[in-house]
Amino acid sequence: FGMLLRNSEFKGNSSYEHVISAAQAGRGADPFGYRAEFINLVNKARALDNRPTVNTNEGGGIQFK
């Protein structure tokens, strides 16, 4: 997930969808809601990320002001 945020050259074919899918598959018991919160965080990052879906290695990840 961090590599997606940074637009790392090592992220390979990673995607927010893959991160969400893996997190949901491994969610299991979540008594304090931390795992659900992580999934929510990834969804928010995906919504904010306006880079092209093709890995062009342009830009430096999500830009915060």
Image (tube, helix red, strand yellow):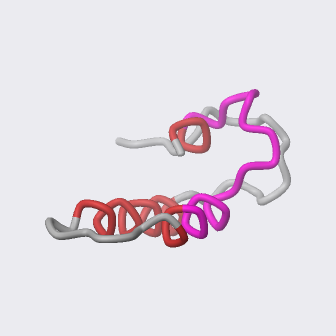
Q: Pinpoint residue 46: horizontal percent, then vertical percent.
A: 54, 63
At 67% across and 30% down in the image, what residue appears? Answer: 8
Residue projecting furthest to the top? 9
Please tell me which residue is depicted at 39% across the width and 43% down the height of the picture.
64
Q: Which residues make up the magenta segment?
A: 6-22
Q: Position of residue 36 (x, y in %)?
A: 32, 70
5, 63: nearer the viewer: 5
Farthest-out residue, left: 32
Please determine whether, in this image, residue 14 is positioned above or below residue 11.
below
| 6 lies left or right of 52 | left
- Residue 38 in magenta? no
Which image quadrant is residue 35 in?
A: bottom left
Q: How many numbered discs sit on the rendered protein?
A: 0
- Which of the 4 image quadrants contains residue 40? bottom left
Q: Residue at x 46, y 61 (%)?
A: 42
- Quadrant of the image containing the C terminus: top left
| Rendering coords of residue 4 (x, y %) | 61, 44
Q: Foreground residue, 7 or 38?
A: 38
Residue, x 28% and y 65% (percent of image)?
A: 37
**As drawn, is 6 to the left or to the right of 57?**
left
Quarter of the figure with residue 29:
bottom left
Tell whether 64 sits left or right of 8: left
- Comparing 32 with 18, the one in front is 32
Please say if 3 is above or below 53: above
Foreground residue among 25 and 3: 25
